[in-house]
Image: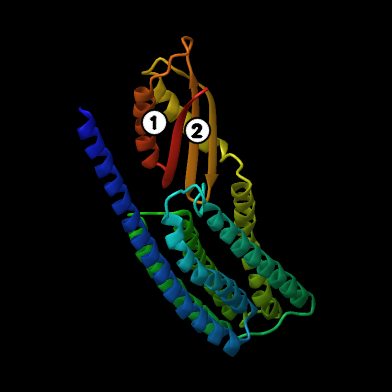
Amino acid sequence: MNERDVEISKREAKKKERRSRKDKLAIEKRILRLSFMGSVFFILAEGVMAWYTHSHSLWTDCLFDSADLVMIGPFMVLVPLLYKPVTEKHPYGYAQVESLFLLVKYSVLLALTCNLMVENIKLLFHGGHDVDAGSIAVFEFLVCVCCAVMYAILGHYSKKYESTTIKAELYMWKLDVISSMGVAIAFAVQTALLHTNLRFITPYIDPAVAVVMALLLIKEPVCEIFQSIKNLILFAPEEETLSQIRAIVDQHMKDYPYEVTFLDVIQTGRKLWVEVYIGNQTDVIHISIIHKVRDEIKQELRDKYDQVYIEVIPD
Protein backbone atom coordinates (compact mmCIF):
# COMPACT_ATOMS: atom_id res chain seq x y z
CA MET A 1 0.00 0.00 0.00
CA ASN A 2 1.52 3.35 -1.09
CA GLU A 3 1.42 6.63 0.85
CA ARG A 4 -1.60 7.91 -1.10
CA ASP A 5 -3.62 4.81 -0.25
CA VAL A 6 -2.62 5.10 3.40
CA GLU A 7 -3.73 8.74 3.50
CA ILE A 8 -7.09 7.88 1.88
CA SER A 9 -7.54 5.05 4.39
CA LYS A 10 -6.90 7.44 7.29
CA ARG A 11 -9.40 9.97 5.96
CA GLU A 12 -12.05 7.28 5.56
CA ALA A 13 -11.39 6.08 9.12
CA LYS A 14 -11.84 9.63 10.46
CA LYS A 15 -15.09 10.06 8.51
CA LYS A 16 -16.36 6.75 9.87
CA GLU A 17 -15.45 7.80 13.42
CA ARG A 18 -17.30 11.13 13.03
CA ARG A 19 -20.41 9.33 11.73
CA SER A 20 -20.22 6.92 14.66
CA ARG A 21 -20.07 9.82 17.13
CA LYS A 22 -23.09 11.49 15.53
CA ASP A 23 -25.06 8.24 15.69
CA LYS A 24 -24.15 7.71 19.35
CA LEU A 25 -25.05 11.30 20.22
CA ALA A 26 -28.44 10.95 18.50
CA ILE A 27 -29.19 7.71 20.38
CA GLU A 28 -28.13 9.15 23.74
CA LYS A 29 -30.24 12.29 23.22
CA ARG A 30 -33.25 10.17 22.29
CA ILE A 31 -32.89 7.98 25.39
CA LEU A 32 -32.48 10.99 27.69
CA ARG A 33 -35.51 12.74 26.18
CA LEU A 34 -37.67 9.63 26.62
CA SER A 35 -36.42 9.18 30.17
CA PHE A 36 -37.08 12.86 30.92
CA MET A 37 -40.65 12.80 29.60
CA GLY A 38 -41.42 9.51 31.35
CA SER A 39 -40.00 10.83 34.63
CA VAL A 40 -42.12 14.01 34.42
CA PHE A 41 -45.29 11.95 33.94
CA PHE A 42 -44.59 9.55 36.82
CA ILE A 43 -43.46 12.29 39.21
CA LEU A 44 -46.67 14.23 38.64
CA ALA A 45 -48.74 11.07 39.17
CA GLU A 46 -46.80 10.10 42.32
CA GLY A 47 -46.98 13.64 43.69
CA VAL A 48 -50.76 13.82 43.29
CA MET A 49 -51.20 10.36 44.81
CA ALA A 50 -48.84 11.13 47.70
CA TRP A 51 -50.77 14.32 48.46
CA TYR A 52 -54.08 12.49 48.27
CA THR A 53 -53.05 9.52 50.48
CA HIS A 54 -50.45 11.30 52.70
CA SER A 55 -48.17 8.31 52.10
CA HIS A 56 -44.54 8.82 53.15
CA SER A 57 -43.33 5.95 50.97
CA LEU A 58 -44.86 7.63 47.91
CA TRP A 59 -43.26 10.94 48.90
CA THR A 60 -39.90 9.16 49.24
CA ASP A 61 -40.16 7.72 45.74
CA CYS A 62 -41.50 11.00 44.30
CA LEU A 63 -38.76 13.19 45.80
CA PHE A 64 -36.01 10.75 44.79
CA ASP A 65 -37.27 10.70 41.20
CA SER A 66 -37.63 14.52 41.26
CA ALA A 67 -34.00 14.96 42.29
CA ASP A 68 -32.94 12.66 39.47
CA LEU A 69 -35.15 14.56 37.00
CA VAL A 70 -33.65 17.93 37.97
CA MET A 71 -30.26 16.51 36.97
CA ILE A 72 -31.38 15.15 33.58
CA GLY A 73 -32.29 18.61 32.22
CA PRO A 74 -28.80 20.20 32.50
CA PHE A 75 -27.16 16.96 31.40
CA MET A 76 -29.08 17.00 28.10
CA VAL A 77 -27.25 20.28 27.40
CA LEU A 78 -23.93 18.74 28.46
CA VAL A 79 -24.13 15.58 26.33
CA PRO A 80 -23.03 17.14 22.99
CA LEU A 81 -19.85 18.43 24.68
CA LEU A 82 -18.88 14.85 25.59
CA TYR A 83 -18.53 14.04 21.89
CA LYS A 84 -16.18 16.91 21.09
CA PRO A 85 -12.63 15.78 20.19
CA VAL A 86 -9.68 16.22 22.54
CA THR A 87 -7.78 19.49 22.00
CA GLU A 88 -4.67 21.15 23.43
CA LYS A 89 -6.93 23.43 25.47
CA HIS A 90 -8.99 20.48 26.74
CA PRO A 91 -6.60 17.49 26.82
CA TYR A 92 -9.24 15.30 28.47
CA GLY A 93 -12.12 16.82 26.53
CA TYR A 94 -15.20 17.27 28.72
CA ALA A 95 -15.04 13.79 30.24
CA GLN A 96 -14.29 15.11 33.73
CA VAL A 97 -17.32 17.41 33.51
CA GLU A 98 -19.41 14.25 33.25
CA SER A 99 -17.70 12.81 36.33
CA LEU A 100 -18.28 16.08 38.22
CA PHE A 101 -21.92 16.13 37.14
CA LEU A 102 -22.47 12.56 38.34
CA LEU A 103 -20.74 13.41 41.64
CA VAL A 104 -23.13 16.34 42.23
CA LYS A 105 -26.16 14.31 41.13
CA TYR A 106 -25.50 11.37 43.42
CA SER A 107 -24.47 13.61 46.34
CA VAL A 108 -27.88 15.31 46.13
CA LEU A 109 -29.62 11.92 45.95
CA LEU A 110 -27.62 10.63 48.93
CA ALA A 111 -28.45 13.69 51.07
CA LEU A 112 -32.12 13.45 50.13
CA THR A 113 -32.28 9.72 50.84
CA CYS A 114 -30.61 10.10 54.26
CA ASN A 115 -32.99 12.90 55.21
CA LEU A 116 -36.05 10.88 54.20
CA MET A 117 -34.79 7.85 56.11
CA VAL A 118 -34.26 9.89 59.31
CA GLU A 119 -37.71 11.50 59.08
CA ASN A 120 -39.46 8.15 58.63
CA ILE A 121 -37.53 6.55 61.48
CA LYS A 122 -38.80 9.40 63.69
CA LEU A 123 -42.33 8.69 62.46
CA LEU A 124 -41.96 5.01 63.41
CA PHE A 125 -41.06 5.99 66.98
CA HIS A 126 -44.10 8.28 67.14
CA GLY A 127 -46.62 5.55 66.30
CA GLY A 128 -46.66 5.69 62.49
CA HIS A 129 -49.80 6.78 60.63
CA ASP A 130 -52.70 5.33 58.66
CA VAL A 131 -53.07 5.53 54.87
CA ASP A 132 -55.45 4.19 52.21
CA ALA A 133 -53.47 1.02 51.62
CA GLY A 134 -55.77 -0.39 48.93
CA SER A 135 -55.53 2.68 46.69
CA ILE A 136 -51.75 2.83 47.08
CA ALA A 137 -51.37 -0.89 46.24
CA VAL A 138 -53.36 -0.52 43.00
CA PHE A 139 -51.55 2.69 42.06
CA GLU A 140 -48.09 1.21 42.66
CA PHE A 141 -48.94 -1.90 40.65
CA LEU A 142 -49.93 0.32 37.69
CA VAL A 143 -46.72 2.35 38.13
CA CYS A 144 -44.71 -0.89 38.15
CA VAL A 145 -46.23 -1.99 34.83
CA CYS A 146 -45.66 1.43 33.21
CA CYS A 147 -42.05 1.61 34.47
CA ALA A 148 -41.41 -1.90 33.10
CA VAL A 149 -42.66 -0.74 29.67
CA MET A 150 -40.41 2.35 29.80
CA TYR A 151 -37.43 0.22 30.88
CA ALA A 152 -38.02 -2.15 27.95
CA ILE A 153 -38.21 0.78 25.47
CA LEU A 154 -35.00 2.38 26.77
CA GLY A 155 -33.31 -1.03 26.89
CA HIS A 156 -34.17 -1.51 23.19
CA TYR A 157 -32.45 1.76 22.23
CA SER A 158 -29.48 1.11 24.53
CA LYS A 159 -28.62 -2.07 22.61
CA LYS A 160 -27.27 0.18 19.86
CA TYR A 161 -25.22 2.25 22.28
CA GLU A 162 -24.82 2.41 26.06
CA SER A 163 -22.82 5.07 27.94
CA THR A 164 -22.25 5.61 31.66
CA THR A 165 -25.16 8.03 31.72
CA ILE A 166 -27.50 5.68 29.88
CA LYS A 167 -26.59 2.89 32.31
CA ALA A 168 -27.48 5.21 35.20
CA GLU A 169 -30.87 6.00 33.62
CA LEU A 170 -31.61 2.32 32.98
CA TYR A 171 -30.65 1.54 36.57
CA MET A 172 -33.10 4.18 37.85
CA TRP A 173 -35.98 2.74 35.80
CA LYS A 174 -35.10 -0.81 36.85
CA LEU A 175 -35.06 0.36 40.46
CA ASP A 176 -38.48 1.99 39.95
CA VAL A 177 -39.89 -1.32 38.69
CA ILE A 178 -38.59 -3.24 41.71
CA SER A 179 -39.50 -0.60 44.30
CA SER A 180 -43.02 -0.11 42.89
CA MET A 181 -43.68 -3.82 43.00
CA GLY A 182 -42.34 -4.02 46.56
CA VAL A 183 -44.52 -1.12 47.71
CA ALA A 184 -47.59 -2.61 45.98
CA ILE A 185 -47.05 -5.94 47.77
CA ALA A 186 -46.45 -4.23 51.13
CA PHE A 187 -49.71 -2.26 50.96
CA ALA A 188 -51.63 -5.25 49.67
CA VAL A 189 -50.46 -7.07 52.81
CA GLN A 190 -51.53 -4.06 54.90
CA THR A 191 -55.01 -4.22 53.36
CA ALA A 192 -55.25 -7.89 54.32
CA LEU A 193 -54.05 -7.19 57.88
CA LEU A 194 -56.86 -4.69 58.47
CA HIS A 195 -59.24 -7.63 58.94
CA THR A 196 -57.04 -9.60 61.37
CA ASN A 197 -55.77 -9.39 64.93
CA LEU A 198 -52.56 -7.79 63.57
CA ARG A 199 -54.40 -4.60 62.68
CA PHE A 200 -52.25 -2.67 65.19
CA ILE A 201 -49.23 -3.13 62.87
CA THR A 202 -50.76 -1.27 59.92
CA PRO A 203 -49.86 2.32 60.98
CA TYR A 204 -46.18 1.35 60.91
CA ILE A 205 -46.15 -0.17 57.42
CA ASP A 206 -46.00 3.06 55.39
CA PRO A 207 -42.99 4.62 57.23
CA ALA A 208 -41.33 1.19 57.44
CA VAL A 209 -41.63 0.76 53.67
CA ALA A 210 -40.19 4.26 53.22
CA VAL A 211 -37.18 3.38 55.42
CA VAL A 212 -36.57 0.12 53.54
CA MET A 213 -36.76 1.98 50.22
CA ALA A 214 -34.25 4.54 51.48
CA LEU A 215 -31.85 1.78 52.58
CA LEU A 216 -32.10 0.11 49.17
CA LEU A 217 -31.66 3.42 47.32
CA ILE A 218 -28.63 4.55 49.32
CA LYS A 219 -26.18 1.98 47.92
CA GLU A 220 -26.08 3.30 44.35
CA PRO A 221 -25.30 6.96 45.27
CA VAL A 222 -22.50 5.90 47.64
CA CYS A 223 -20.83 3.67 45.02
CA GLU A 224 -21.17 6.27 42.26
CA ILE A 225 -19.81 9.07 44.48
CA PHE A 226 -16.62 7.09 45.16
CA GLN A 227 -16.29 6.18 41.47
CA SER A 228 -16.77 9.81 40.37
CA ILE A 229 -14.14 11.01 42.86
CA LYS A 230 -11.69 8.43 41.49
CA ASN A 231 -12.41 9.62 37.96
CA LEU A 232 -11.95 13.27 38.87
CA ILE A 233 -8.54 12.74 40.46
CA LEU A 234 -7.57 10.45 37.56
CA PHE A 235 -7.02 7.24 39.49
CA ALA A 236 -6.55 4.03 37.52
CA PRO A 237 -9.76 2.06 36.79
CA GLU A 238 -10.74 -1.14 38.57
CA GLU A 239 -8.28 -4.07 38.59
CA GLU A 240 -10.58 -6.07 36.31
CA THR A 241 -10.42 -3.33 33.66
CA LEU A 242 -6.63 -3.06 33.98
CA SER A 243 -6.18 -6.81 33.61
CA GLN A 244 -8.39 -6.90 30.53
CA ILE A 245 -6.50 -4.05 28.86
CA ARG A 246 -3.12 -5.55 29.73
CA ALA A 247 -4.17 -8.91 28.23
CA ILE A 248 -5.21 -7.20 24.98
CA VAL A 249 -1.96 -5.20 24.80
CA ASP A 250 0.19 -8.28 25.51
CA GLN A 251 -1.71 -10.29 22.91
CA HIS A 252 -0.89 -7.76 20.17
CA MET A 253 2.67 -7.04 21.31
CA LYS A 254 3.78 -10.69 21.20
CA ASP A 255 4.02 -10.50 17.37
CA TYR A 256 6.60 -7.69 17.55
CA PRO A 257 10.16 -7.51 18.92
CA TYR A 258 9.18 -5.23 21.81
CA GLU A 259 8.15 -5.70 25.40
CA VAL A 260 5.77 -3.62 27.51
CA THR A 261 7.72 -1.87 30.26
CA PHE A 262 4.85 0.13 31.73
CA LEU A 263 1.10 0.48 31.20
CA ASP A 264 -0.59 3.76 32.15
CA VAL A 265 -4.41 3.68 32.13
CA ILE A 266 -6.72 6.57 33.04
CA GLN A 267 -10.50 6.44 32.93
CA THR A 268 -12.72 9.44 33.52
CA GLY A 269 -16.39 9.45 32.62
CA ARG A 270 -16.85 7.49 29.43
CA LYS A 271 -13.33 8.10 28.11
CA LEU A 272 -10.32 5.83 28.45
CA TRP A 273 -6.68 6.82 27.94
CA VAL A 274 -4.07 4.09 27.54
CA GLU A 275 -0.34 4.75 27.25
CA VAL A 276 1.80 1.71 26.44
CA TYR A 277 5.51 2.18 27.11
CA ILE A 278 7.69 -0.26 25.16
CA GLY A 279 11.36 -1.12 24.82
CA ASN A 280 13.71 -3.78 23.42
CA GLN A 281 17.30 -4.92 23.80
CA THR A 282 18.58 -3.22 20.63
CA ASP A 283 17.06 0.20 21.36
CA VAL A 284 15.79 0.28 17.77
CA ILE A 285 12.18 1.40 17.41
CA HIS A 286 10.33 1.42 14.08
CA ILE A 287 7.70 4.16 13.89
CA SER A 288 5.64 2.27 11.31
CA ILE A 289 5.41 -0.73 13.65
CA ILE A 290 4.39 1.49 16.56
CA HIS A 291 1.56 2.97 14.48
CA LYS A 292 0.45 -0.46 13.33
CA VAL A 293 0.32 -2.03 16.79
CA ARG A 294 -1.39 1.08 18.17
CA ASP A 295 -4.15 0.84 15.57
CA GLU A 296 -4.59 -2.87 16.25
CA ILE A 297 -4.92 -2.37 20.02
CA LYS A 298 -7.21 0.64 19.57
CA GLN A 299 -9.52 -1.27 17.24
CA GLU A 300 -10.00 -4.10 19.75
CA LEU A 301 -10.44 -1.77 22.73
CA ARG A 302 -13.12 0.16 20.83
CA ASP A 303 -15.25 -2.97 20.79
CA LYS A 304 -15.18 -3.04 24.61
CA TYR A 305 -15.04 0.63 25.65
CA ASP A 306 -16.81 3.73 24.42
CA GLN A 307 -14.20 6.42 23.67
CA VAL A 308 -10.62 5.15 23.65
CA TYR A 309 -7.36 7.08 23.20
CA ILE A 310 -4.19 5.05 22.98
CA GLU A 311 -0.51 5.83 22.45
CA VAL A 312 2.46 3.48 22.16
CA ILE A 313 5.54 5.26 23.51
CA PRO A 314 9.22 4.20 23.43
CA ASP A 315 10.51 3.99 26.99
Which residue is located at x 62 percent, y 74 percent? 60
Which residue is located at x 61 percent, y 50 percent? 232
Q: In the rendered image, which residue does mark 2 sit on?
A: 275
Q: CA distance from mark 2 to mark 1?
A: 10 Å
- Is 203 situated left or right of 83 in this image? right
Which residue is located at x 45 percent, y 33 percent? 311
Tell which circle, 2 or 1, labels the residue nearer the N-terminal end.
2
Q: In the rendered image, which residue does mark 1 sit on?
A: 294
The colour style of the image is: rainbow
- Is 254 situated left or right of 263 in this image? left
Q: Nearer the viewer, residue 220 or 10?
A: 10
- Residue 300: image quadrant is top left
| Mark 2 element type | strand
Q: Amino acid at mark 1?
A: Arg
Say above or below: 76 vs 90.
below
Neighbourhood count class around disc 2 (C-alpha, 10 Å): few under 14, some 14–19, many 20 upward: some
Q: Amino acid at mark 2?
A: Glu
Which residue is most to the bottom?
A: 52
Say above or below: 215 vs 194.
above
Q: Position of residue 102 (x, y in %)?
A: 57, 59
